[in-house]
Image: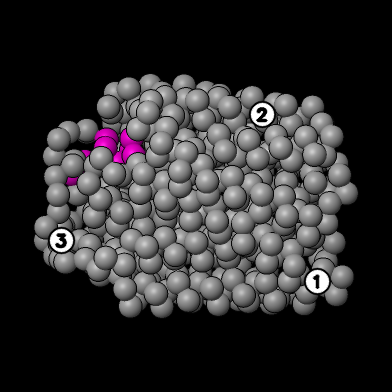
Amino acid sequence: MASDMSQAPLASPPLSPLAVPVLMGVVFLSLIGFGVVIPLLPFYATVFGASAWQVTSMFAVFAAGQFFGELIWGRLSDRIGRKPVILGTILMAALGYVALAFAPNIWFAIAARAVAGVFSGNISTIQGYIVDVTPQEKLAGRLGLIGSAFGIGFVVGPLLGGVLARPEIGAAGFQPPLLTAAALCLAGGLGAAVFVRESRSRGMAGARRPGPLQALAQTLGDPTLRRLMGGTFLSFAGFSAMWSIFGLWGAAAYGWGPKMIGFVMALTGVAAATSQGLLSGWAVKRIGERPTVLVGLTVTAVFLFLEALGPPMVVAIILMVILVIGHTTSQPATSALISRAAPFGRQGETLGANNASSAAARVLGPVLAGFLFAGVGPWAPFVLAGVLILPAAALIGLGGRRSA
């Protein structure tokens, strides 16, 4: 599918110079909301008497919702425009945090996370906007800045979740951070409404598209995109397996509570922001997109195996930071490879299909991790993660060579 036409410019309306920074802010605020939740989820086990597999199911159903959301919203934004999709999904994601704040039991919480996941699957729409307005030579760097906004959100979000949560008073103790997350989403939506102009031309936005599943099948029919998306799937299956048991692992191995979990996640967020905002773009310029992915994912797998050995706490934190740097450095380069391989006028749809593959992976990874954590030991999900990420590097390496 890759061709010179895939990079042809769109005849878009004039854009506000603040549009891209505001969208980075939207991602940042959204990830604060997502990060707020992560330190809280393991402690639903205490409040609602939930088992480990039910806690990891909250990760899995959120990712399942994102799978369908990414298929729907990226394609819909290609057809009707980016801005209405961005605004609508932000509003509904905020409502999802409100629903989770008032969940009366674990099953309602799981259902709320599933619905919220559907409307959080809008990253491909934001990525599509960036592709619309960015010259090819700057694309990896700018996608890296979007990833950096993810990382900064992971710094602030877990800290807010850890500091504002009061699990000792039961479910009501989770309301302050979750309602804060909802308010931040609404603030991001307001910024997008004011400063973001539509990036799609009227003719391109109105073009007819295949259905979501048909579009996914067409994307997977291309050998280059199939390899790249297969690598994305395996990479995120492994990484989400590790993240889904992170709180349980920290509590079991080192006796961490919500504040310590939030602190360690903040450290990894700083690492992710730095690697995606600075390191990834630098690495792509120096060695290219495909080698950046190969090195990043290989480093990630090696350090996951080292983490499984049960090192002392300080060493474990250092290993976690390094493996996060490896994984996040690879992500913008992978997105750039996929956008280059996408057919003309369907970057949002193709990036949505890729993000859907990562969302599907985040269903599988936590489910496997939950069973391994309970049935084998806290170290087992780290081994699983490394085993999945190594072949991901090989697949993306093959796909990247063909899309170059």
**Distance from the alpha carbon under mark 2 to that under mark 1:** 33 Å
Left-right relation of 185 to 399: right
Q: Look at the numbered disc 2 and give the secondary structure of its residue.
A: helix
Q: Is residue 282 left or right of residue 300?
A: left
The secondary structure making up most of the magenta span is helix
Q: Which residues are magenta?
A: 336-344
Q: Indicate the position of residue 197 as horizontal and vertical percent values.
A: 25, 70
Q: Earlier in the sequence, mark 1 or mark 3?
A: 3
Mark 3 → mark 2, Cα distance in angstroms:
44 Å
Residue 32 vertical position relative to residue 338 in the rendered view, above or below = below
Residue marked by disc 2: 303
Name the amino acid, label 2.
Phe
Relative image position of residue 87 (x, y in whole percent): 38, 72
According to the image, what is the colour scheme of the structure?
one colour
**Residue marked by disc 3:** 12
Q: Secondary structure at mark 3?
A: loop
Please report the residue visible at 60 percent of the width from the left and 51 percent of the height from the top: 269
- Is 134 left, or right, of 261 in this rendering? left
**Image vertical order of residue 140 relative to residue 39, above or below:** above
Relative depth, front residue between 298 and 125: 298
How would you rate the neighbour count of disc 1 (Cα within 10 Å): few for under 14, some for 14-19, many for 20 or more? some
Give the residue drawn at x 13%, y 39%.
5
Give the amino acid type for the residue marked by disc 1 in the picture: Arg
Per the image, label 1 sits on a secondary structure element best described as loop
Tag of residue 96? none
Residue 325 or residue 368, whichever sits in front: 325
Closer to the chain start, of discs 2 and 1, is: 1
Residue position marked by numbered label 1 in the rendering: 166
Residue 162, how many percent across, how many down? 74, 63
x 47%, y 35%: residue: 330
Measured in 3D between alpha carbons, the distance from the residue under mark 1 to the one under mark 3, in whole angstroms, is 48 Å
